[in-house]
Structures are given as C-alpha cells and as structure tokens.
Image (cartoon, grey):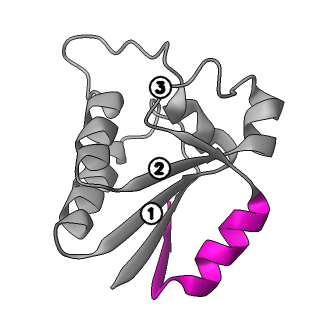
C-alpha cells in the first residue's frame, strides 16, 4: 500500500509528535511510505535542531525512517517563508514542490495529515 503522510507540525511544542513518528515507523514496515513536510512541518528538516537529552529526538526518528527507504520531502515554498532551505537541512530531506505533493496525493492509496 502506498501511504503519504503530510506533516504540518513543528518538531517541538506538540505533545503527540512521538506518537506520529512511531506510527510512521509502523507504516514503513509493510508499506511504501512518503513523508511530506509542509507549513510549520518544514522546521523538522533543520540540521540545527538540538533537543535536550531528555526530549524526543525527531531527527533520530527521521534517520530511522530514511534507513527504511522512506522518502522524506519538504516543501520549498513553505521553507523559503520560514528560512528553511537545502543549505541548512539534514541531507536525508529532499526539497520538493506543491506540484509534487499534488502528484503524490493522486498516487497514494491513503493520505494522512498531522
């Protein structure tokens, strides 16, 4: 099954992000999964994220998903409005467009948005 997850929440300040990443890891086990970071979700791609030792490490979770061949894209337009671009993001994130999001949405069996 082809699943698209659209993530619009920033890495911190949302209590449920740990549950979202665990759900994505579960989806990635038996499905083709793509994650698209949109709006404030693009902040998740920043290489400068530095969680405290007792906080949930979002970049670590995204790296685990990347190792499972999950495509992780971030919206170029949302990023430009928030100072996020391909020069200040982790290399596992790929800059993308809303046009590609439209294409991914049409091709997906399921679309889940957080």
The answer to whether residue 68 is above or below residue 104 is above
On residue 90, which mark appears? Answer: 3
Q: Earlier in the sequence, mark 3 or mark 1?
A: 1
Q: Is residue 23 above or below residue 107?
A: above
Q: Residue at x 76, y 60 (%)?
A: 98
Q: Is residue 105 left or right of residue 114?
A: right
How far is the residue under mark 2 from the one under mark 3?
11 Å
Magenta range = 98-114
What residue would you read off at disc 1?
34
Residue at x-position 47% and y-position 50%:
72
Measure the C-alpha gap from mark 3 to mark 1.
Answer: 17 Å
Task: Determine the secondary structure under disc 2.
Answer: strand
| Helix, strand or loop for disc 3 | loop
Quadrant holding the N terminus:
bottom left
Which residue does the image show at 74% across and 54% down from the upper left? 97
Q: Is residue 100 magenta?
A: yes
Label 2 sits on residue: 72
């Amino acid at each position: 099954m082809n699943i698209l997850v659209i993530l619009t929440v920033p890495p911190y300040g949302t209590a449920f992000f740990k549950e979202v990443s665990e759900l994505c890891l579960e989806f990635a086990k038996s499905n083709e999964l793509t994650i698209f970071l949109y709006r404030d979700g693009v902040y998740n791609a920043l290489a400068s994220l530095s969680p405290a030792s007792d906080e949930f490490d979002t970049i670590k979770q995204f790296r685990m998903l990347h190792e499972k061949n999950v495509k992780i894209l971030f919206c170029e337009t949302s990023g430009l409005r928030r100072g996020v671009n391909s020069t200040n993001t982790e290399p596992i994130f790929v800059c993308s467009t809303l046009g590609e999001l439209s294409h991914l949405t049409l091709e997906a069996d399921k679309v889940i948005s957080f």
